[in-house]
Amino acid sequence: MVEKVVLTAQRELFTLYEIHKSDVWFDFEVADRYGRGRNGSPKSLRFYIYSREHPKSKDTEMDRPWQEGDVPLWPYEDKPKKTVPTKRKVKQTDWLTFDTDYQRDLISQFLNAIFDTDEAAYYLQKIDDEQQRSVDTYSQVLQVLYEKQRQPKFSQGTKRYKQKSLREFVFATNLKNYGWSIEPYQP
């Protein structure tokens, strides 16, 4: 889309601007990306509209579409950003202060959101068994889940990718940092 639609339109409009057949032209940048591939696909584009009254730069050399190596684009008008109320974020050390029932409920909700009922019950049972031997088990599981959720690839991944990641890495490998692990679920 960027190469065939946006860049084509930008070139045509800028050419018309240069020969004084248009009073406006635009520049753009890819604001967000998602997925894999060549740096991922554009999730959103940010457009900068320029006119003869408000050119990109007073320097005619810089009054052209953005090219690799140029300074980053800045909007003509800076509008204050709206403050979006955020959800209460739990600091990674906060779950040590939660009671064990609340910790177990958090883990259960997370597992049930990703796995089917039998597999979620399997992992929760294994975690409960380890909790009987070590008081900090729930907080250890919450820690590795928290670290995994912070990874962009995991948060943007499909449900199957998340399942595989939890089976093969979080429960089988990452928990070994705490001296224990869970074998992958076998139906």
Image: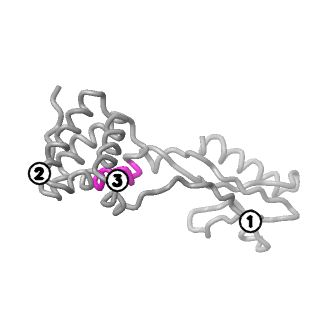
- Which circle, 3 or 2, is nearer the viewer? 2
Q: Is residue 44 left or right of residue 98?
A: right
On residue 78, which mark appears?
1
**Residue behind mark 3:** 146
Earlier along the polypeptide chain: callout 3 or callout 2? 2
Crowdedness near tag 3: few (<14), some (14–19) or many (≥20) residues, C-alpha within 10 Å:
some
- Name the residue furthest top: 187
Residue 84 or 106: which is nearer the viewer? 106
**Residue behind mark 2:** 133
Crowdedness near tag 2: few (<14), some (14–19) or many (≥20) residues, C-alpha within 10 Å:
few
Who's the residue at 24% across and 31% down the image? 119
**Residue 20, percent across and down?**
88, 56
Residue 122 or 72: which is nearer the viewer? 122
Please provide the residue range marked out in magenta: 142-153
**Residue 124, percent across and down?**
23, 39
Q: Is residue 133 left or right of residue 90?
A: left
- Which circle, 1 or 3, is nearer the viewer? 3
Residue 70 is covered by the magenta coloring: no
Q: Secondary structure at mark 3?
A: helix
**Residue 78, percent across and down?**
74, 65
- Which circle, 2 or 1, is nearer the viewer? 2
Who's the residue at 19% across and 52% down the image? 175
**Dot 1 amino acid type:** Asp
Who's the residue at 16% across and 40% down the image? 126
On residue 105, which mark appears?
none
Q: Secondary structure at mark 1?
A: loop
**Dot 2 amino acid type:** Arg
Q: Are marks 2 and 1 in contact (CB under 8 Å)?
A: no
Earlier along the polypeptide chain: callout 1 or callout 3? 1
**Residue 27, percent across and down?**
70, 56
Distance, label 2 to label 1, CA atoms, is 57 Å
